Image (cartoon, helix red, strand yellow):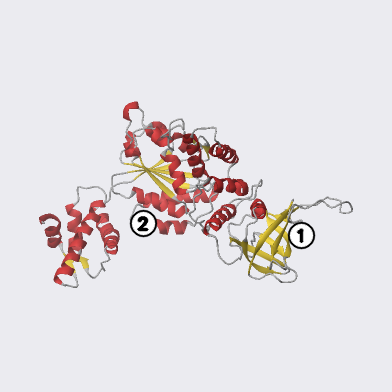
């Protein structure tokens, strides 16, 4: 519902003096409207400017002018300034426009005439002449606009659409200076969860304080930069077409019908509830059977960024949960770094080799530190010192031996057991996936390197005692490299391998 900003001043009495330097400028009351579109166009404008005289063109340069809670857009030549009334502003962008006006920022608007209004869908920071885009200032402005577009109207919870169209991705611009972060909090603090907004303002004060040590200021800056560069989203997940999901699985995985069925069941559950399942996935099976590929496929289906953590390299819980800032060499943990790397609060968190976490000197497995993350009740990093929401995190773990995983961790996962491939399956995987992948990587056409049916069977036989299909891909690369050598040195156009040739190259050489 639109809300109007009224001016209750008595115009019959003495007029309130305008700020110095603004004599003669005009400002008007405006309405605000709510929309939750994650794009801006003529149907979903950032703001609406009145233009009955049709004087505004597709691109127009100028400045926003603000007096108290009124605004206008100032444009035209310095000798003939014009002031256009702003009829409406998307509630998410009010603070941003106020900030642009207060800082006298020169902008170029892009929009379309709709009736008697000019609907603005793009704002760029430009030089005073309105001709050249300012790289640094505009980079910050576009980052803020994309974050605001991805957010919901302030102080209002509205259900999202079931659309599965991919959202526009903001430029990879990281805020790292105090001024940029302060400006971001002024104009876009509404995109942050309430507790993180409070935390951010406190850490900004620490970063500016001269009464604390340089190490404390540096830690506050680092933590603040990490948190503000994460896109904090709600945990609503749009519906996914199960048929499209199955197509992605079939393109990336051969066989595994039971595994694919479980994943499709999970997708249908998400479609019904629009939330992630209460439990993550634990993929158990021999090395090389495609456990990680399954996790990547799920991330692709859900259109989520993913980040991977190798538990075999972790022997201390502090590596996961971070170290307190009281130490000069303190740093955030790998879980917090995963959020920072993904730049999103909604992500697929891939935990590789969960069964290989080394207990170290403490006698406790560092993997148990994952419990708070897996419970979806929020996670607190010792370095950041702020609870972050985790209900948008979908954990997918891999393991070779689930008996080495603690009972508390096992209760947080839905387990999917993956068997090794049969010889026939391995041959088909070699012919349909491994060999084409290697030939494409080495830029060799299928006509230049041909492996016969007997040759493929021989490769499978040679590696029959090895689990998974990694050795098959290595064999394909060995044969492809050998073929490339013959093509370049003997100038043949095609190299064909049968069983005897395969044995000669892979065993006898």
Please identify the residue farthest to the left as the structure is shown: 508
Residue 316 visible in image: yes
Q: Is residue 326 left or right of residue 439?
A: right
In the foreground, 459 or 439: 439
In the foreground, 210 or 398: 210
Residue 358 vs 349, above or below: the answer is above
Q: Quadrant of the C terminus?
A: bottom left
Q: Quadrant of residue 356?
A: top left
- Residue drawn at x 29%, y 60% is 437
Q: CA distance from mark 1 to mark 2?
A: 61 Å
- Residue drawn at x 22%, y 69% is 448
Coordinates of residue 324 in the picture (x, y in percent): 45, 31
Which residue position is annotated with label 2?
252
Residue 384 vs 431, above or below: the answer is above
Coordinates of residue 56 in the picture (x, y in percent): 68, 69
- Residue drawn at x 21%, y 56% is 475
Residue 26's mark?
1
Mark nearer the N terminus (1 vs 2): 1
Residue 391 visible in image: no
């Amino acid at each position: 519902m639109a809300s109007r900003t009224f001016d209750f001043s008595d115009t019959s009495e003495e007029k309130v003096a305008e700020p110095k330097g603004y004599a003669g400028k005009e400002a008007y009351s405006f309405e605000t409207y709510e929309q939750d579109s994650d794009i801006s166009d003529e149907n979903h404008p950032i703001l609406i400017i009145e233009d009955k005289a049709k004087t505004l063109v597709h691109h127009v340069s100028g400045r926003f002018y603000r007096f108290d809670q009124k605004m206008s857009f100032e444009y035209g030549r310095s000798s003939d300034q014009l002031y256009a009334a702003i009829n409406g502003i998307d509630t998410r962008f009010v603070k941003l426009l106020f900030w642009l006006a207060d800082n006298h920022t020169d902008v170029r608007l892009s929009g379309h005439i709709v009736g008697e209004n000019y609907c603005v869908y793009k704002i760029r920071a430009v030089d005073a002449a309105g001709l050249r885009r300012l790289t640094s200032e505009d980079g910050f402005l576009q980052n803020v606009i994309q974050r605001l577009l991805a957010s919901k109207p302030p102080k209002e919870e509205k259900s999202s659409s079931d659309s599965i169209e991919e959202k526009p991705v903001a430029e990879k611009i990281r805020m790292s200076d105090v001024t940029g972060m302060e400006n971001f909090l002024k104009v876009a603090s509404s995109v942050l969860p309430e507790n993180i907004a409070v935390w951010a303002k406190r850490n900004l004060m620490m970063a500016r304080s001269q009464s604390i040590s340089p190490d404390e200021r540096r830690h506050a800056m680092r933590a603040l930069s990490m948190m503000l560069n994460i896109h904090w989203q709600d945990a609503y997940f749009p519906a996914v077409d199960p048929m499209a999901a199955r197509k992605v699985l079939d393109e990336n995985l051969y066989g595994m019908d039971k595994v694919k069925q479980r994943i499709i069941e999970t997708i249908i559950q998400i479609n019904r509830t629009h939330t992630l399942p209460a439990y993550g996935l634990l993929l158990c099976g021999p090395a090389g059977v495609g456990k990680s590929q399954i996790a990547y496929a799920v991330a692709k289906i859900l259109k989520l960024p993913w980040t991977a953590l190798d538990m075999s390299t972790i022997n201390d819980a502090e590596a996961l949960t971070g170290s307190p800032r009281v130490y000069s060499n303190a740093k955030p943990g790998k879980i917090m770094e995963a959020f920072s790397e993904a730049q999103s609060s909604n992500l697929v968190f891939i935990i590789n080799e969960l069964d290989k976490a080394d207990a170290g000197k403490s006698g406790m497995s560092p993997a148990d530190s994952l419990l708070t993350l897996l419970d979806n009740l929020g996670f607190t990093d010792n370095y950041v010192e702020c609870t972050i929401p985790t209900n948008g995190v979908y954990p997918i773990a891999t393991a070779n031996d689930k008996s080495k995983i603690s009972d508390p961790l096992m209760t947080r996962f839905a387990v999917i057991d993956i068997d090794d491939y049969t010889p026939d399956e391995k041959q088909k995987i070699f012919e349909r996936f491994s060999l084409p992948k290697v030939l494409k990587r080495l830029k060799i056409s299928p006509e230049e390197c041909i492996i016969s049916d007997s040759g493929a069977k021989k490769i499978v036989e040679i590696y029959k005692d090895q689990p998974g299909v990694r050795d098959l891909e290595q064999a394909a690369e060995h044969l492809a490299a050998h073929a490339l050598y013959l093509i370049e040195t003997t100038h043949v156009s095609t190299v064909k391998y049968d069983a005897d040739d395969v044995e000669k190259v892979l065993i006898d050489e």
